[in-house]
Image (cartoon, coloured by chain):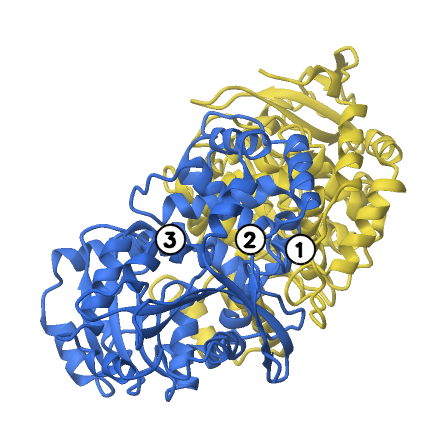
Chain colours: A yellow, B blue
Amino acid sequence: MRRDASAVRRSDVSFVVNPKQPTDKVEMATEQRYNVAVPDEKIQELRDKLSTATFPDELVGAAWDYGSPLTDIKRLAKYWETGFDWRAQEERLNALPNYHRSIQIDEFPALDIHYLHQVSDTPDAIPLFFCHGWPGSYIEVTKMLKGLKESHNGVSFTVVAPSLPNFAWSEGVKVKGFGLKQYAETCHQLMKSLGYDKYVSQGGDWGFYITRAMGLLHPEAVMASHINMIRASAPTWTSHPYLALKHTFTPYSDRERKGMERSKWFMDEGQGYRLLQCTKPQTLGFSLHDSPIGLLAWLLEKLHDWTDNYPWTDDEVLTWVSIYYFSTAGPAASLRIYYESIHHTQNGISRDRTQQWIPKVKLGLCHSPKEITVVPSTWARTLGPVVYEDFKGKGGHFAAHEVPDEIVGDLRKMFGKDGPCYKITEPHAKL
Amino acid sequence: MSNQIRPYKVAVTEEAISTLRSKLQAATLPDEVEFSDDWDQGTPRSEIARLAKHWADGFDWRAQEAEINRLPQFMTTVELDGFGQIDMHSVHQKSEKKGSIPLLFSHGWPGSFLEVGKIIPLLTRNADGLSFDVVAPSLPNFGFSGGSRQRGFGIAQYAEAMHKVMLSLGYNKYVTQGGDWGFKVTRFMGIQYPNHCLASHLNMILASEPDMVKHPKEYAQYNSVQQTATEKQFAERTAWFMQEGLGYNILQSTKPSTIGFALADSPVALLAWIYEKLHDWTDNYPWTDDEILTWVSIYQFSTAGPAANARIYYDIQNSAARPFSDQVLEYNDKVLLGLSYFPKDIHLPPLAWGKTLGPVVFEGVHESGGHFAAHERPDELAKDLRSMFGAQGGAASVAARFAGTKG
């Protein structure tokens, strides 16, 4: 397994045992700490490329309509080159509980997976799997970590938040055929290897697709899922007669109408990146790898378009983009999940399948007004047994980052006392 | 209207060449994996590595430039309604024979005026009393024409610019040949200037399914006749393109500025972006490295810069622009049409569909060839044009209108 030795500093292997956990749950979890340590040469390479960057011409009166504007990219590029302090950000990242371990799934070579593992030491802790998407990363969970650790409403959460294969500090996949099923199995294996036979999940973007696939593959393990990006179709008479009836005779609410406008905007104006990444990731990969301003423009457009007036600071943006630039597998690798998920579907584990009814896994829905696809409630309820649903007044695609208190609140309501999934991960849990 | 025509020779600055070289030398490529050379996923890594090295060390731009400059080129400034002046670069080769048919050749993306190179001698020579004067401009925002920094430079502006190039060269009436953007631009010229644009030959056919009421004959033909083996092939090729090849198109139609940064900043990015099409859209055309790099260099060294050309997609095909530009798919009875189908092109509708575009007086279905017809199959394309405008051809009446002119 190829690893850039200079980028990874491992401390000695340490044994972590949580004395408060019931003994039938605990395992001798051998966990290896992970330290983010981007080599100096890599930082210098970035600065050199930025200092010699050639910018395109300025289109007058375009704002964000044609894509990332020149003035924003120029300003951010300058700061990235001369002011942005990656080492300071790196230090902050290293204050998080970073670990890594080897995960191997059937028919594929083992991969070194980086993950955050924050153990809650209250007796009512349940394991929560947090799955990021694109162009996000594991750090999207950061603002929720403190809240999730504390016991509220009779529940707290032990959090596992990996970098997906091909992203951030996890290893890249070097062989073909690593599709949605493989991402899901890798994530499930991670939870299992940490001793979590039963767990719950939270996710959006690829986190939606992967946690849904995990629920399909391992209904014995994934007890419940909370999702903040909801992809679903209208109920049909044959598959969901009750919902179809409701859908036909209930007028759309104001929220739903606005949501459909938002969805239409995304269909009309926002599909290019996905179609390209699903078909020619390699062609695009050269752009993202060789040109930092190319990468910055590619990602910034989403951070702007997909959020609800989130007040990104320059440091925030550049930390997010730097994680892609400095990632172990490189920014081109992060696109491959799109291609593989379309071209390598196995055992019926596909994007389309995850947008249909999945039994057993209790579902919690977070409807965010500025998500990229906003569906009516009757559509959302075709996804599975919905036990929790909330309609947010604000928030977009990166819900955990934009409105972390909302997501933490949802999880506490869903899994806390009097909630529909109280004690769900316990063997004798009643719902 | 000041439209002084001045002779032009391509003369890229030393600075541009040395900047290109140093960027190539500093270029970094994605990690090698098992599938890095899989054309299905995009331009192969080893191809880019090889071509980038050659582009930096071996490729002789000045030699290519000298070769390009053997084509007679001109620059003319045209005034566009509401969009100001734009410098239009053009190849202009007159036939020796007076009264030749003025032919506007319109390139597309990721092509250029260079695509006309091989067919110029085939069209300008006098054979069977038929010859053409060939005009091949760089579209605005492409090649060595100026660009526009105003948003909304749409199909009407592209058509106007091309039309005014013809006028400035003294061609009040003319015919057109085009594929890719050449299809839409020349079709719109036929809508906007039907007294000037008398006939159009097209080699990438975009057409809609015949409507029963609007095109009863074509509707009947399409629905009653069995799909031929050729049309089956066409449908497969088109389906492949729609499924696997549309990404660049939707992206540039919605967010051209976003991709523009990488294309402006990284020659390796630009090379991959364009070379993928040169490979995928052609019929096993044996591209030489010099050919590829010359085509890409035209984008690298273009007057408007490598990011500007993607905007043609947004301004003509964005959802807001479509209702206006989709006029090009409607029947235009004023312009005689010639349609040529090359089996490895990217969009190949059933033959009945093409007839909904206008009075089709020539139809040629070829056994081989792809998207860049003039470059891949110059003999066939020239033959098609000679057939269309020749004495027995469907557009002979148009040819006759030029026969008496002073040329």
Query: Left of B267 or right of it: where is A382?
Result: left
Tell me which amino acid carries mark 3: Gln
Q: Name the residue rendered at 62%, 73% in the picture.
A: B86
Give the side of residue B112 with respect to residue A262, left or right: left
Q: SS for tag 2?
A: helix
| Residue shown at 48% from the left, 74% from the top | B162
Residue at numbered disc 3 = B243
The secondary element bearing badge 3 is classed as helix
Q: Amino acid at mark 1?
A: Lys
State yes or no: discs 2 and 1 in contact (Cβ < 8 Å).
yes
Quick check: B381 left or right of B38?
left
Q: Is residue B260 placed above or below B166 in the rendered structure? A: above
Question: Is residue A203 shown left or right of residue B286?
Answer: right
**Residue situated in front as seen by the camera: B163 or B360:** B163
What residue is pinned by disc 2?
Answer: A273
Q: Looking at numbered disc 2 in the image, what kind of residue is underneath it?
A: Tyr
Q: Could you tell me how far apart the alpha carbons at marks 2 and 3 are, in whole angstroms?
A: 14 Å
Q: Chain of mark 2?
A: A
Indicate whether A400 appears above or below A23: below
**Quarter of the image where one finds residue B269:** top right
Residue that numbered label 1 is attached to: A302
Residue situated in front as seen by the camera: A137 or B296: B296
